[in-house]
Image (spheres, helix red, strand yellow):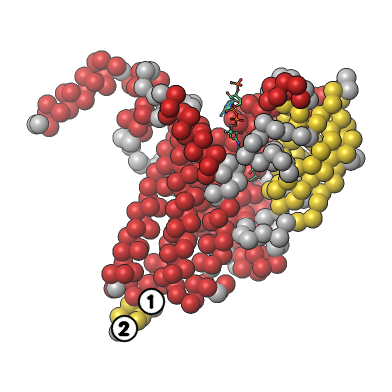
Amino acid sequence: MSVTKASRIVREFRIGNFGIPTLGFGSFSPYFAPLIVSYMDFKLTEEQVAVQLAARDFARTELLPGVIERDEKMKFPTEQIKKLGELGFMGMMVDPKYGGSGMDTVSYVLAMEEISKIDASVSVCMSVNNSLVCWGLEKYGNEEQKQKYLTELASGRKIGAFLLSEPEAGSDATSQRTTAEDKGDHYLVNGTKNWITNGNSASYYLVITQTYPEKGHKGINALIIEKDSPGVTVGAKENKLGIRGSDTHSIMFQDVKVPKENRIGDDGFGFTFAMKVLAGGRIGIASQALGIASGAYELALKYSKERKAFGTEISNHQAIAFKLADMATEIEAARLLCLKAAWTKDQGMDYTLSASMAKLFASDIAQRVTNEAVQIHGGYGYVKEFHVERLLRDAKITQIYEGTSEVQRIVISRTILKG
Ligand code: CAA
């Protein structure tokens, strides 16, 4: 087919018969529609490139020194998070009038990748604060809640946490046992939350609670609870396989009085709130997985050009070169999925499906790529100084939190089967 004919068909298809808005929102499924539009332009704006460079510079100068020690000693990166907040990375997508940086989700993905290349314990704190806490409050909180809590969180002066998981409610998120009894002007909260990122370092918690057990997920409420409220107890820090610098705790609530004005949205909105917020969170964790993979790949690439075996650099051996080729290809595919999900969100379109796809794929390739990075390093890959063993350990959690890979497959399969 001639180029002229092809371009005429494309023009008629896009403008004449359907029009771009129809392609975006019409009879096509939300997954297929944005493919046509989004894959036309891969160029980042100057601002997005500047954000990427700033995050890269911060990660190399502020995070790299000390990352091994923080991992070993399970030390929360207090100073580093403070500086990250001062640079505007803790409330990246929040309107500047609430203390945020007013950036788009694409910039957030770029920054998350750079930070995660070096320190995934820092990036999980950043991801939870940005996409679960700040985004949730900005989107669904009322003006008073934004003034009181969001401004502190988005500016990085305070850290937030998202409390959904429970001892018996992980993937099965509708089975909430933490209760918020309606006492007129306040709720009385009782229960235990597990695996809470930023559990001890956070000042404010967004807590998913059950008010009307007989209504199932329609009886769930999301409440803002201040950590220093009487009746709140922080459990011991979890001793984890990876992201060991991050601050993971159980949180117990015993007769905690929470004013009614701290409820987010209407009575019973809590489960929808959690699902909406988690869809955005999955873009953050997908980008974290991407960053862990690309960090490991960059180290393996460099090492393969320095290390000699059988009289030449190991990158000259096809066994190593082919591994690097697979790693680079998988990372590029994951990056496209992450940016596609971010772009979809920035366009105001439904991004639930693309976020789940990005997380599912990126977390799987993070496993494979970090494993191969250790293999390329040989014995050196097995010791801490070379960083890749940490990245391998850090990668695993991305297949678990903010929805396991199995949960992502539930979301994806339900959506594609619905048609
Ligand atoms: N947006 C809006 N509403 C949604 C939704 C979404 N994305 N997904 C589901 N819902 C609604 C459904 O429409 C349904 O409402 P109706 O009954 O009114 O139709 C309701 O929610 C219940 O949905 P399902 O019937 O689909 O619920 P389910 O029990 O089958 O479970 C699930 C669905 C996808 C498995 C969900 O439970 C889930 O996402 N589980 C994983 C939870 C998770 O990600 N946990 C991570 C913890 S947070 C964390 O890790 C943070 C950290 O610190 C790092």
The N terminus lies in which quarter of the figure? top left
- Image coordinates of residue 294 in percent, x first then y, are 45, 57
Question: Which residue extends farthest left?
Answer: 2
Q: Is residue 354 above or below residue 61?
A: above
- Image coordinates of residue 250 in percent, x first then y, are 76, 48
- Answer yes or no: disc 2 within 8 Å of ligand 1: no
Residue appearing at x 44%, y 53% in the figure: 365
Name the residue carrying label 2: 310
Q: Quadrant of residue 62?
A: bottom right
Residue appearing at x 79%, y 55% in the figure: 236
- Image coordinates of residue 4 in percent, x first then y, are 11, 28
The C terminus lies in which quarter of the figure? top left
Tell me, yes or no, if residue 47 can be seen here: no
Question: Which residue extends farthest bottom?
Answer: 311
Name the residue carrying label 1: 306
Separation of disc 1 and disc 2 at Cα?
Answer: 13 Å
- Image coordinates of residue 153 in percent, x first then y, are 70, 40
Residue appearing at x 48%, y 29% in the figure: 414
Left or right relative to 209: residue 129: left
The answer to which of 348 and 401 lies nearer the viewer is 401
Q: Amino acid at mark 1?
A: Glu
